[in-house]
Amino acid sequence: MQEYIEELRNRLHQHNYNYYVLHAPTISDKEFDDLLEELRQLELQYPQWYDENSPTQRVGSDIDVHFVQEPHMYPMLSLANSYSKEDIIDFDTRVRKTLGIDTVVYTCELKYDGVAVSLYYKDGKLVRALTRGDGVKGDNITTNIRTIKTIPAVLHGDFPQEIEIRGEVLMPRTKFNEFNLQREKQGEQVFANPRNAAAGSLKLQNSSLVAKRPLEAYMYYIPANQPSDSHFENLQIARSWGFAVPTVAKKCENLNEVFDYIDLWNTKRKELQYDIDGIVIKVDSIQLQQQLGYTAKIPRWAIAYKFKAEQARTRLLSVTFQVGRTGAVTPVANLEPVKLAGTIVKRATLHNSDQIQQLDLHTDDYVFIEKGGEIIPKIVSVDVQTRHLFAQKIQFITHCPECGTELIRLQGESAYYCPNQYNCSPQIRGRIEHFVSRKAMDIGLAEATIEQLFTQGLIHDAGDLYSLTYEQLIQLDRFAEKSVRNLLQSIEQSKQVPYYRVLYALGIRYVGETVAKTLAKAIPSIEMLQAASIMQLEQIPEIGTKIAESIKQHFREPYSLNIIEKLKQAGVQLSTVDTEHKQVNNVLQGASVIVSGVFQSYSRDEMKELIEQYGGRNVTSISKQTSCMIAGDGVGPSKLQKAQELGIPILTEDEFLVKIGLKSV
Ligand code: IVH
């Protein structure tokens, strides 16, 4: 049976390779799913033949992991940037001068705009994946990486016994748009661009969620033990091992060919499924690369050419003013719709009144827009030549467009505020939206529903959410029984949200997530926080006068006190209770523990959870830093051997349970 399971796994690995790398599947999706299901069933029946690289493991695990930092075998460096052909001519001159030769062959590749990862394979199996981190050490994100289908779990063909390979994880543009749309519908925060979405996904601590994100990965570099002296060849060889390597890399014999490649992809990049932000030019010969070497931060044998951000020209239709949850007023430019970098743009941010001044924006102006890192593009300049003779200067408003209150400008800030905090509708709704958001109380409530609840007078502030009834909710538009039950359940669950997140949810000005955590740690209940003096608050590390005063101010407002009272009545966590940390005791404090094999009394995931509950950390690969190994039945022989070689204590399941006090000797 073990052999059959292995064979099934190999067949599925091959089909994955045909589909994701060669783009040439030989069986239908249905046939693939059936084979996968057969394997899943067999693995359930025969847990002793568990394999973390099995094709079934792509779905990830439900257990939260905390990433452990591990050193890179070879530092993960950055690239020098260039923005003009002159920069590249200089680079080529430097390279040839250092090497003392007349011509150099380069390989040109796309510069993928994603998140860098370094993958390490031993005996053809993926054993470790690290993020760049600080370049010297990165987060071990192996469990998340295993869910990405274009990354082979097991290599093909003639691969070396040990190999490290680097590449970029991305989210294709169309998948990103669908994904963001779905998030918007569910009232979740959208990502500004595919790169942020990919980075956010890889940071998720639950790999079964990562498995649902449409991520892909392309490889571009083997840092050591290269199979060939040509980088271009190495890319082709990496493809033959099962990695996704785009076929568009090109060997260029001279600078003119390099420039042609840049020009070609500057135009053709719109046709790609994913974002690129430039071209990478690498000396092709590995031997020459070694002669050129590295500075502390970058290789001397490669350079990135960054594309200029795409611009579009369009007409300004009007400027409207939006009031946010803090009362800050943001001007938004409404534009004649225009296509920019693959999407139709109708609006641009103007940030604040200073920017309107700086741009000297007039009615009907033609403007140039550009996409930065944010969702909404920005106006970069005005086409003054085409300005209308009678065009009027755009004036910043003096009164709130929502409630008519005169706007104020706080000292030292560039934004204008509507000071009518407790009666200005977008400010109230904005605070409720913040309260329910994922990192705060995590209540599944869309913006549109909040608006309905608010305009129907069912809620006046976040505290009212806890007295909503089934009868009230079932009357809402598009609210069937199931949505009502889900919402009520979500509200109920939010009563378990730890105190620091409640503190963040309150929306005290300057109290973001990190400050809320610091405060909750230093002052464990809301009553104590209310009673704390400015001086006491200022003694907490990272808390300065501005934050301390803002906290005091918040607790002076009857409006805020009223909300806190409602939360108290509802049973929301307003203090730090010890059980919150689920930590039973700290016998494993600071220990990094690896589990391997199958256990009698607990599943492997339960074992991992126990380790965390008792203060330890789970690691997935063995190093000198590993504190101990818990070995079950069918423990991986290479892991066992490595643990023995490094002299790492090996515990049986029973020995471990005795150690943490769950079993008596
Ligand atoms: S080579 C030692 N090739 O861009 C040189 N990097 O801005 C290793 N990147 O750190 C990098 N596409 O994360 C290389 N085709 C490509 C790339 C690429 C994207 C990323 C990579 C790098 C960053 C530098």
Image: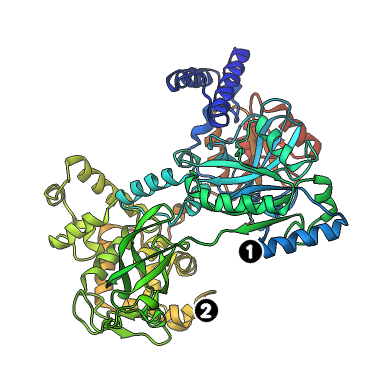
Q: Which residue is mark 2?
A: 539
The one nearer the camera, 388 or 350, is: 388
Q: Position of residue 532 (x, y in %)?
A: 42, 78
Crowd class of label 2 (few under 14; some 14 to 19; many from 20; radius 10 Å): few
Q: Is residue 542 above or below residue 3?
A: below
Amino acid under label 1?
Ser
Q: Position of residue 424 (x, y in %)?
A: 21, 74
The one nearer the camera, 232 or 350, is: 232
Quarter of the image for residue 238 reads top right
* Lower sequence index among marks 2 and 1: 1
| Closer to viewer: mark 2 or mark 1 | 1
The reply to whether residue 106 is in sight is yes
Name the element at disc 1: loop
Q: Position of residue 317 (x, y in %)?
A: 27, 69
Disc 2 from disc 1: Cα separation: 51 Å
Q: Is residue 424 left or right of residue 496?
A: left
The one nearer the camera, 109 or 60, is: 109
Q: Which residue is mark 1?
A: 84
The one nearer the camera, 474 or 577, is: 474
Residue at x 44%, y 55% (from the top left corner):
341
Crowd class of label 1 (few under 14; some 14 to 19; many from 20; radius 10 Å): few
